[in-house]
Image: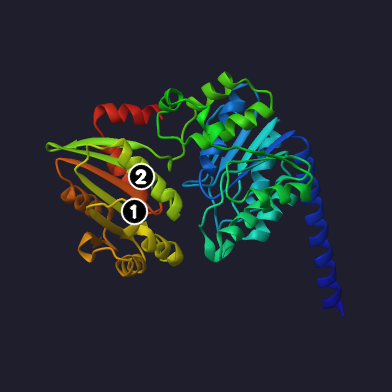
Amino acid sequence: MTLILGLSLLVLFLIGLGLVEYAVHRRNLASIPIRIHVNGTRGKSSVVRLVAAALRAHGIVVYAKTTGSLARMIAADGTEFTIHRPGLTNVIEQRRIIGVAAAERAEAIVLECMALQPKLQSLCELKLIRSTHGVICNARPDHLEVMGPTERDVALALLGTCPVNGTLFTAEREHLPLFEEACRDRGSKLVALGPEQADEISDEEMERFAYIEHKDNVALALAVARDLGIPRHVALNGMLHARPDVGALREIELEFFGRRVVFVNGFAANDPVSTERIWNLTLARNPQARTRILVINCRLDRPDRSRQLGEVLPSWAPAHHYLLVGTGTYALARTAVAAGLRPTLLTPLEGESSPAVFEEILGACGRNSLVMGAGNIAGVGLDLLKFFQNRATPRAEGEADAA
């Protein structure tokens, strides 16, 4: 009987402690009038950084957090801090970041959604962030094993972060009826951006970015800034000076014993739609390349993603070499060959060290070569990015510093 009583008291104590912590969290949220929650398949980290930079340029005290290639907290002055995780990734981490922002008297927070499970995405919005402004960049076929099985299911999962009585911004164009329905359900205004909004941003303005940014991302950030009363020129100037995510799309050029190599960091693109778009963009920007190499970083714990890429790879503009690195490369190779890709074009490099992969890439390069990384930036992907950055020509190195 005494044991039961003790357990009951312990349970009551823990419940009481949880209620107190949640009350403190709600108080912290209430102290931050602008709360922006960014979700989507691709571009979340970039949009977080762009929006935060626009607010910062307008004099708003803003704290931001990305969970993309590398988790970062961005302070009000733009200083970045690595987020250390003693255990597994947990969405409760958002509460800690909000607590820091509230303690620093932040006027705004911009947080990237870190949940994949549909129920957790909704929980993050309704309980942890309670955003005034929501952003869903796009809804593409990725993480289908969690949010799928269809692209429509992915859109529904992402819509779990639609704000209540707020404003939702999106550049998604294929699933707008679902977005309209979600906004009606939660009493929010939908701001859907089409190609015309992206086209309002000139090519000259895009060329001012020190890396390759997407017009849709900039258009979304400008739309949020406009809703907050920030002049366009102020917002855009802030974005141009924002530090990009480590996974941001950028070109790095190097000269190697008379050979010119352009390396494109597309590792952060890991769904088939985004990867093909970046591949086509890369080819269009580098028509002089005589040798085209695609380096795909696979993950053993993402076999569905590897199979999806393998199924569509033969239908893309062709590369001369496909180097498969990371883990679980057999799933991609088998699927790609079954879909019609010539086996002789594939080079499996599973288990090879980053220096060995780098040497393999250079060995496949001709006098004028284009190399694009895709699949995932973790592990060997990040290592290869550093290898190319550290060996960039002075001009490209200066561009990287500016970014």
Q: Earlier in the sequence, mark 2 or mark 1?
A: 2
Residue for badge 1: 316
Q: Are marks 2 and 1 in contact (CB under 8 Å)?
A: yes
Q: In the displayed structure, does residue 5 sit left or right of residue 84?
A: right
Q: In the displayed structure, does residue 278 sit left or right of residue 3?
A: left
The three-letter code of the residue at mark 2 reads: Asn
Give the color scheme: rainbow, by chain, secondary structure or one colour: rainbow
Q: Nearer the viewer, residue 125 or 20?
A: 125
Instruction: Kindly report the distance in space between the C-alpha atoms of the residues bearing marks 2 and 1.
Output: 8 Å
Q: Position of residue 397 (x, y in %)?
A: 30, 30
Q: Position of residue 46 (x, y in %)?
A: 51, 38
Residue 54 appears in the figure: yes
Above/below status of 224 relative to 16: above
Q: Secondary structure at mark 1?
A: loop
Indicate the quadrant where residue 170 lies: top right
Indicate the quadrant where residue 172 lies: top right
Q: Nearer the viewer, residue 55 or 97?
A: 55
